[in-house]
Amino acid sequence: MPFLLVANIMNAKFCRSGRVVTLLLAVSFLSACGSVPQPRLYLLESPAGQEGEGVTPPAPELRELGVVMVSLPGYAVNAQIASLATNGSVTQDNDHRWAEDPAMAINRLLVDRLRKHADTTVLTEPWPRDYRPTARVKVVFDRLLREPSGGADMSGQVQLLSGDGRKLLKIMPFEFVLNGQDTARQAFFVAVSQGVDDIARMAIEALQQLELKS
């Protein structure tokens, strides 16, 4: 067999083998990518067993309330759960995340709890032009972390504003360290839910004491 023909046959076999190896590598890569576990997502829901409980009788001064979007520290605005490590550092968990934007989730629950405790109309910004709230509630978080025990470490301030938002009526600092039943990530969301409920109670009680005029 001529040398050139043998060389061509050898090259053809090598090329076919190379293509097979390339295809196998591609399939292996796609399989590896497909086997990566997806992050677990968690919803922030109302505290269990509190529907209809602890509702403050409606006061005439609190016919309508407005809620300003809550403010979170930079490390807590992402979907990854921010946790406080035992050495004091803050870590973000890529495997366990909020199912929705954290600020929007907390704001949604805050509106719900204010409505439950005051038994009044509560809307969040932006609201209709003809909506005239008696007062506005703004919650600013300085700290929102998952505790090593599984609970939540929350601090910040509740700002009570006039209905038009031009006057600051009262500032109330808050600081909660709510222990979780276990170290599961779900315990963090249960603790945050309880903390938001406590904040709503604080706001309603303070607003009623201010004896606002609509």
Image (cartoon, rainbow, N blue to C red):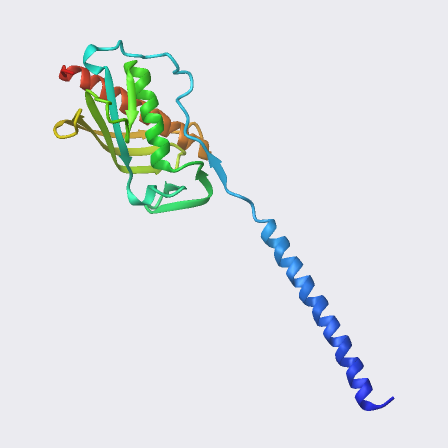
User: Is residue 2 or residue 64 the one in the foreground?
Assistant: 64
Q: Quadrant of residue 189?
A: top left
Q: Residue at x 14, y 17 (%)?
A: 210
Rendering coords of residue 147 (x, y %): 36, 36
Q: Residue at x 26, y 27 (%)?
A: 67
Q: Is residue 147 visible?
A: no
Q: Residue at x 35, y 12 (%)?
A: 53
**What residue occupies the far bottom of the structure in this picture?**
2
Q: Quadrant of residue 186?
A: top left
**What residue occupies the far top of the structure in this picture?**
57
Q: Is residue 188 visible?
A: yes
Q: Which residue is drawn at 12% across and 28% down?
A: 167
The C terminus: image quadrant: top left
User: Is residue 30 or residue 186 the one in the foreground?
Assistant: 30
Above or below 165: residue 49: above
Rendering coords of residue 78 (x, y %): 37, 43
- Position of 89 compared to 27: left or right? left
Rendering coords of residue 51 (x, y %): 39, 15
Above or below 194: residue 15: below
Rendering coords of residue 108 (x, y %): 35, 28
